[in-house]
Image (tube, rainbow, N blue to C red):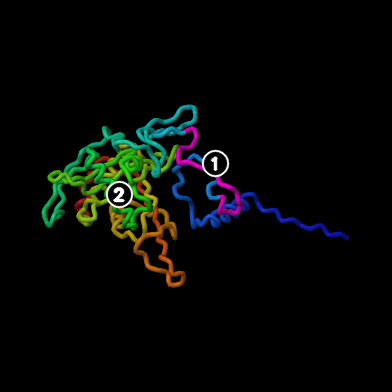
Amino acid sequence: MRMKRQQHEWPRWKLTQHCMVALAASEGWMGSVQAAYSPHHCDGRRGHTTGITQRNASAWEPGLMPGFARGTVNHPPGPRTTTSTRLFSVSAYSGTPSDGKAGIESLAPFPLHTTLPNVHDGTAAHVEVGTFDSMEDVEAGRRLMNDVIVEGKAWPFEPLFEDETSFRGYFLSHTAFVVRDTTTQKVLGSFYIKPNFPGRCSHICNGGFIVDPSIRGHRVGTLMGSCFLLYAKQLGFKGSYFNLVFASNHASIKLWERLGFQRVAAIPNAARLEGMPVDETTGEPVLDTAYGYYYNLEELPDDYNPLDALSMT
């Protein structure tokens, strides 16, 4: 009697999962791709010359997904809620060059003025939280951005922002701010507020913060973080989520937890950072863990005063 060979059928989801893992491994990925919501217009074959299937990869050019216009969010036909966040473009890692002034008419108090003690050799500095008002402000912001990229310890980027347009496309695509010394006009720090995700999740915002290395530890970061909470809520966002707060960035972790952010996620082996210890087994630098921090902006008190955070320990 001839026995019928039993065939093993994998569930479709399992087969898809294993194919994805195999393809990712063949491309050298340890996790996901560079930026899930930064679209490029190509044929979907990038990397096939080094992957499982040996094909000639078609030429591709950076661009936008078909049907998307720069600085807009596409919505399906039908009624939808209109809020200030609908004016913003796609997500944290995409945008169109702008002046960083989207929605500033809804902010109050703005500009914000205060005094920070012991900033300049023990003397106080009178500072303003305001917008990027000049080419000097933009260039100062770009230099700070490139400095932290070269430092390689707090941001995921590796290529520098080589010109004003590229910097405006990332940092000033939505609503962006500087902290400037009103006496010297020097930019002491900068931050932005923009949607973290596209479309139906665009009510969750993201922020990026940079403090001039020469004045770290003098509450500039605290001032920016507390203003971020107030202004993000006034811009219409319902929550804030920071994607990549690295475990080795102790000052950043301390700041966000002091301001009331909750750690809600952890991604192991997330970042190749400068200055990490070397693994004795592999001889390679250890990959750092990244935490996700969330703040429910709907719970921010209506009488929230960002200056109160400056007295927190």
**Label 2 to label 1: alpha-carbon separation:** 32 Å
Q: Earlier in the sequence, mark 2 or mark 1?
A: 1
- Looking at the picture, how far across and down is residue 196, in whole percent? 39, 43
Residue at x 49% of width, y 55% of height:
31
The three-letter amino acid code for the residue at tag 2 is Met
Q: Which residue is mark 2?
A: 145
Which residues lie in the magenta part?
A: 48-67
The three-letter amino acid code for the residue at tag 1 is Asp
- Looking at the picture, how far across and down is residue 40, in whole percent? 47, 41
Looking at the image, which is closer to me, 197 or 41?
Answer: 41
Whether residue 313 is visible here, answered yes or no, is no
Specify the farthest residue to the top. 78
Residue 92 in the figure: left or right of residue 209: right
- Looking at the picture, how far across and down is residue 170, in whole percent? 35, 42
Looking at the image, which is closer to me, 209 or 38?
Answer: 38
Q: Is residue 110 above or below residue 221?
A: above
Element on which disc 1 rests: loop
Q: Which residue is mark 1?
A: 43
Residue at x 38% of width, y 54% of height:
263
Is the stretch drawn in magenta largely helix, strand or loop? loop
Looking at the image, which is closer to me, 124 or 183?
Answer: 183
